[in-house]
Amino acid sequence: MYDFNSICNRLIKSDFNDYENNLKKFISFLMGNELIYEYIKDCGSPSYDVKTEVETVQNLYDSIFELGNSNDEEVTNIFHLLKYCTENDINFSHGITFGYSNSNKYQDKLDSFNARVVMVLITHIEIHLTKIGIDMGIDETIKYNITANGGQVNVAADSSTINATQNNGIDTKLLAKLLVEVQELAKNLTSEEQEEVHDFVETIQLLQEPEKPKKSLIRTALLGLKGIKGTVEFGAAVTALVQFLQTALK
């Protein structure tokens, strides 16, 4: 979060002479951060032709960008608008920001543009990162419920399988077996690492419940599991589980 806040503050506080350069760094940071970029991609494609939207705002005095009708649309529209502008060296001070303030000062227009457009994107990303932090901090419970396309597998804390069903082509018995192996091999980890494994499993369980869960949070849990440095056997068990989940969630 510190790096994200730092790059955001630099952009928001930019002098209009430095804005295009700082915006390129901002977009590069978003695309280089896997958690953030996966979230942006999960929000879908822009709801309009970005090139046409930029040209309209450039050519019509007092025109402003259409951000979208939902949170996902706001995220993807704003990101792709800013990305298009950086890739095509669009000058913000001469055209893009004119409709965002009645002031005749370039800096005032840019500051208003940041407040009404860029901060919308930043706020959505901040909320997403905060939710990830909350999900990863959930306390361990006795039972983990993993839902795969409607079929549910329950794994008890002692690694015994409570229930396993076959549904919609998903081998839930195999899923249960993979989870048991990860839990068993996690016993060789430190207590802190064991808690992390449990938290990641809980995160996957929570994200499997909606019909169309956000894949970015699932990827976060998978990345977390892969990031735990355990034994070779534990790593192999995690790899098998990750591969299974990636296939099941396509």
Image (cartoon, rainbow, N blue to C red):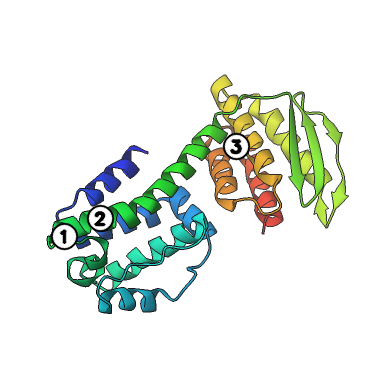
Element class at badge 3 = helix
Do the CB atoms of the residues marked 2 and 1 lie less than 8 Å apart? yes
Question: Residue 28: where, in percent of width, then height?
Answer: 32, 58
Q: Residue at x 77, y 23 (%)?
A: 158
Whole-number angstrom distance, CA of label 2 to CA of label 1: 10 Å
Amino acid type shown at disc 2? Ser
Element class at badge 1 = loop
> Quick one: 206 or 120, which is closer to the camera?
120
Question: Residue 202: where, in percent of width, then height?
Answer: 65, 34
Labelled disc at residue 112? 2
**The N terminus: image quadrant:** top left
> Is residue 147 rendered to the left or right of residue 123?
right
Whole-number angstrom distance, CA of label 3 to CA of label 1: 63 Å
Give the image quarter of residue 92. bottom left
**The C terminus: image quadrant:** bottom right
Badge 2 density bin: few <14, some 14–19, many ≥20, Cα 10 Å: some
Give the residue number, with chain letter if any, for mark 3: 232
Amino acid type shown at disc 3? Val
Reading the chain from its start, which is encountered first: label 3 or label 2? 2
Where 182 falls versus 16 (above or below)? above
Can residue 123 be spotted in the picture? yes
Reading the chain from its start, which is encountered first: label 3 or label 1? 1
Amino acid type shown at disc 1? Ser
Give the residue number, with chain letter if any, for mark 1: 103
Q: Residue at x 68, y 50 (%)?
A: 245
